[in-house]
Image (cartoon, rainbow, N blue to C red):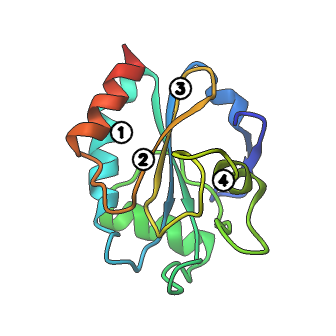
Amino acid sequence: MLDFTMTRLDGSEQSLSSYKGNVLMLVNVASQCGLTPQYQGLQDLYKRYEGRKFEILGFPANNFGQQEPGTEQEIAQFCERNYGVTFPMFSKISVKGSDIHPLYADLTSRPAPIGGDVQWNFQKYLVNREGEVVARFDPQTEPDDPALVKNIEELLA
């Protein structure tokens, strides 16, 4: 999982290996979705655990209903202006289909219950400190969901 190098919204390259030793949540996000208010819950979760080597990595994707049509600059401005997002955000990628990004091709090709197609915006994957994907949460799972929070706390312990 940590072998990928991704492009940040500002255009800089970042190796995911720089997150080794952290608990990660990977989320495909969109700014014009009924689930977009989850950005606030994600930001709250990030602030709650950021001092404990926890990172949320946001991956904008326009795969579902054209709900992320913006440019990288527009996405960054939207996230900052509306939700005060401070967790790392990456350039727009595809999370399904023939142009699926290799990171998501890896995630979706794993055995159940981790693998399988991304269902919609705001699907969440938890990654342990060693870079192993250990859980998947459906898009409708809110960031403050007790089962999700319990998983994060167990991984941080």
**Disc on the earlier residue, 1 or 2:** 1
Going by the image, does 128 lie left or right of 31?
A: right
In the image, which disc is placed on residue 8? Answer: 4
* Residue at image point 54% right, 86% down: 66
**Mark 4 closeness class: few <14, some 14–19, many ≥20 residues within 10 Å:** some
User: Does 88 sit above or below residue 21?
Assistant: below
Q: Please tell me which residue lies in front, 62 or 78.
A: 62
Q: Which residue is mark 2?
A: 86
Q: Amino acid at mark 4?
A: Arg
Q: CA distance from mark 2 to mark 4?
A: 13 Å
Task: Where is residue 141? Give x, y as percent.
Answer: 30, 55
Secondary structure of residue under mark 4: loop
Mark 3 and mark 4 lie on one chain; the one further toward the N terminus is 4
Residue 70 is at least partly visible in this image? yes
Query: Which residue shows up at 35% across the image and 39% down it?
Result: 46
Q: Nearer the N terminus, badge 2 or badge 3? A: 2
Q: Residues within 10 Å of mark 3 (few under 14, many from 20)?
A: many
Q: Secondary structure at mark 3?
A: loop
Q: Is residue 11 left or right of residue 22?
A: right
Q: CA distance from mark 4 to mark 1?
A: 18 Å
Q: Quadrant of the N terminus?
A: top right
Secondary structure under the numbered disc 2 in the rendered image: loop
Q: Would you name the residue on which mark 1 appears?
A: 46
| Nearer the camera: disc 1 or disc 3 | 3
Nearer-N-terminus badge (4/1): 4
